Amino acid sequence: MTARVKICGITTEAGMDAAVAAGADWVGLNFFPASPRHVTPQRAAELAARPGLPTLVGLFVKPEDAEIAAVLAAVTLDILQVYVNAPRAAEIRARFGLPVWRAVGVSAAADLPRDPGGVDGFVIEAKAPPGATRPGGNAVTFDWSILAGWQAPAPWLLAGGLGPDNVAEAIRATGATAVDVASGVEREKGIKDPALVAAFARAARGTVQPA
């Protein structure tokens, strides 16, 4: 099978249309105010009105229930991607009844999740560098050899510093069957480049993984 693709942090209609045209499996909307890819619930609803959308993922960083509820009142999300600890992630899943992916920053094998922890999947990326204002989306890769021998307890996506030029290598090195990109397909912060989106999807899908 070929790797599945998530295009995250979409802020414009052109970016959403590019993800759809590239055949993205998921598109992500970022609700973290400190991110250059942040969208309001109202803006998210406008973007989600584009035709032909794939599975829609909402990204939240240490959210209160009220924050998630406000977004869901404006736009229908299929999956919640959260930057929280494992108990809180399970709590969010129980509260809202939607699939939850927990984002996990890694710098050593000890950081990798060993059990599902009540969630449906994981986004595995580099730990945020010192001084970072956000826990992910920092265009930082990590040592992919950390993943050698890891038995993933749930479906997962590889993220962090990926782009058209290195995604195929990343998939081969890690065995990832799904990849997540944000800044790696932008022409400027927060603005997706349709050509880069298409190139990323082609590169990811050109790498065949064992069935």
Image (cartoon, rainbow, N blue to C red):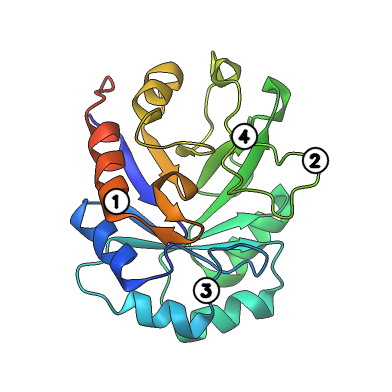
Q: Which residue is mark 4?
A: 115
Q: Secondary structure at mark 4?
A: loop
* Relative side of 197 to 83, left or right: left
Going by the numbered disc 2, the residue's amino acid type is: Pro
Q: Gap in Å between the C-alphas at discs 3 and 1?
A: 20 Å
Callouts 1 and 4 close, C-beta under 8 Å:
no
Q: Which residue is mark 2?
A: 130
Disc 3 or 2, which lies upstream in sequence? Answer: 3
Residue drawn at (40%, 65%), measured in percent from left and top? 78
Residue ranking furthest to the front: 188
Disc 1 or 4, which lies upstream in sequence? Answer: 1
x, y (%) of residue 60? 61, 63
Q: Gap in Å between the C-alphas at discs 1 and 4?
A: 25 Å
Going by the numbered disc 4, the residue's amino acid type is: Asp
Going by the numbered disc 3, the residue's amino acid type is: Val
In this rendering, is residue 18 above or below 162?
Answer: below
Residue drawn at (68%, 75%), measured in percent from left and top? 65
x, y (%) of residue 107? 70, 27
Q: Secondary structure at mark 3?
A: loop
Q: Which residue is mark 3?
A: 39
Packing grade of label 3 (10 A; few <14, some 14-19, many >=20) is many
Quarter of the image where the C terminus is located: top left
Callouts 1 and 2 close, C-beta under 8 Å:
no
Q: Which residue is mark 1?
A: 25
* Relative side of 193 to 94, left or right: left
Going by the numbered disc 1, the residue's amino acid type is: Asp
